Image (tube, rainbow, N blue to C red):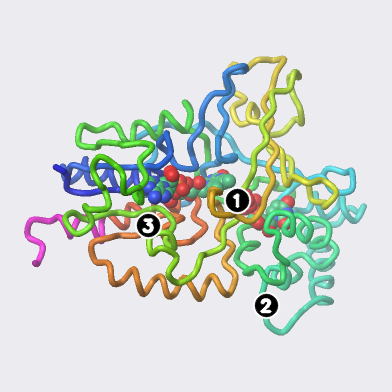
Amino acid sequence: MNVDLVVVGAGFFGLTVAERCANELGLRVVVIDKRDHIGGNAYSSVEPETGIEVHRYGAHLFHTSNKVVWDYVNTFTSFTDYRHRVYTTHKGEVFPLPINLGTINQFFHSAYSPTEARALISEQAAEGAVATVANLEDKAVALIGRPLYEAFIRDYTAKQWQTDPRELPAEVISRLPVRYNYDNRYFSDTYEGLPVDGYTAWIERMADHPNIEVRLSTDFFDLDQEINIRDTVGTVPVVYTGPVDRYFDYSEGPLSWRTLDFEEEVVQTGDYQGTPVMNYADTDVEYTRIHEFKHFHPERDYPADKTVIMREYSRFAEDADEPYYPVNTAVDRERLLRYRERIAEQPNVIFGGRLGTYQYLDMHMAIGAALSTFENKLRPLFATDAPA
Ligand code: FAD
Ligand code: UDP
């Protein structure tokens, strides 16, 4: 094969690497993906009856505080001024998220000032305090106290992860801010927005280069292909963004993942829930949240009498399922360390992205990591004067 670099996976990590190598270094890059589309989990397409853009693997909201990433992504697309806000339903009542003064006052039927609310929550947090914060439950109780934890976090988290919150790492909850004012923006980043003409247009522009060849429906591990891509390992460098355990034939044991099931429905009403995302905090509702896609783009001319909703259900991934979220139990972390030792024995393969590093990465993190991989590993590797 007449190529300089093989990239496995056409998600944001793989495409950023491919784009940089083609544009900056003039390399010939083949990008393969086992799916029949590019974009990885950020892929979106138009629902035909309504014309509404649907994020096929769950709602994707772009946000970052990294100026380098923001400038980079803006070379492919402009962004709307969308600001993400989420509400949650608990015992038949709707509350704003992330937990803020509005949530606290509504929950306690009170009118606390920021100082009073802080005092109350720190008193409640002190009641459940433990010497060492070892897991998600400890961390959440330390942040918001037990009553708010039990209402908004405990059952939602159990539904989402199907794992006792005492066995989940504390970092999972650290993604959610707690605010003592009425600011209910979900993200605290400097830059935020949605791609003006959709994720797929953005992603296609990244791959649009004469030196980039994309081969879809091509599995790296499928040995019956016309050209066995796997044979290229050893002849050209490979950037691999598939699951790390799969690469090594699960030699150190499988890593656990959470997957999602999406139930999409076209509803004959102009507005189903009045907001893009409604979470369901309680166990009596089986799904974790409902997305209503038209609300992501109020600036678009979408039909006034129809809408698309998607109910999201969460469960452990089995063999044939898409791996979405690393569960990261203590056993997983131990296995990951052993896989990292095996990665170190593969000098010709660079492991990247969410699946390749078994890390929860937002889009801006995957893109940022790919830009660093390009500068720190690939550019030196291909520099003509690189040491042998
Ligand atoms: P991926 O997008 O997963 O791409 C990896 C690609 O590799 C896939 O296309 C896969 O088909 C391919 N592949 C795997 N194995 C093989 C193989 N053997 N052969 C060939 N190809 C293979 N981020 C945000 O910033 N904001 C959000 O709101 C947000 N919401 C999310 C919601 C969900 C449900 C999920 C799952 C993720 C969300 N993310 C969000 C994260 C975002 O999807 C990732 O940051 C981004 O997709 C990472 O890109 P990646 O290239 O690492 O991985
Ligand atoms: N979370 C919760 N209740 C909510 C929203 C979030 O308990 O209503 C917890 C849950 O453990 C979740 C974590 O906070 O896994 C991170 O939330 P986020 O919205 O970032 O999850 P994601 O969108 O990545 O699924």
Is 225 one of the magenta-colored residues?
no
- Residue displayed at 52% across by 35% down: 194
Q: Earlier in the sequence, mark 3 or mark 2?
A: 2
Q: Position of residue 93 (x, y in %)?
A: 88, 44
**Amino acid type shown at disc 3:** Gly
Q: CA distance from mark 2 to mark 1?
A: 27 Å
Q: Position of residue 30 (x, y in %)?
A: 25, 42
**Amino acid type shown at disc 2:** Val
Q: Looking at the rendered structure, which numbered label has been put on residue 259?
A: 1
Q: Looking at the rendered structure, which numbered label has been put on residue 369?
A: none
Rendered position, 304 above or below 346? above
Position of 119 with respect to 215 (left or right) is right
Of residues 310 and 19, which is closer to you in this image?
Answer: 310
Q: CA distance from mark 3 to mark 2?
A: 30 Å
| Residue under pointer 3 | 352
- Residue displayed at 34% across by 49% down: 220
**Amino acid type shown at disc 1:** Thr
| Residue under pointer 2 | 133
Q: Nearer the viewer, mark 2 or mark 1?
A: 1
Taking the image as four quarters, which one is ligand 2 found in? Answer: bottom right
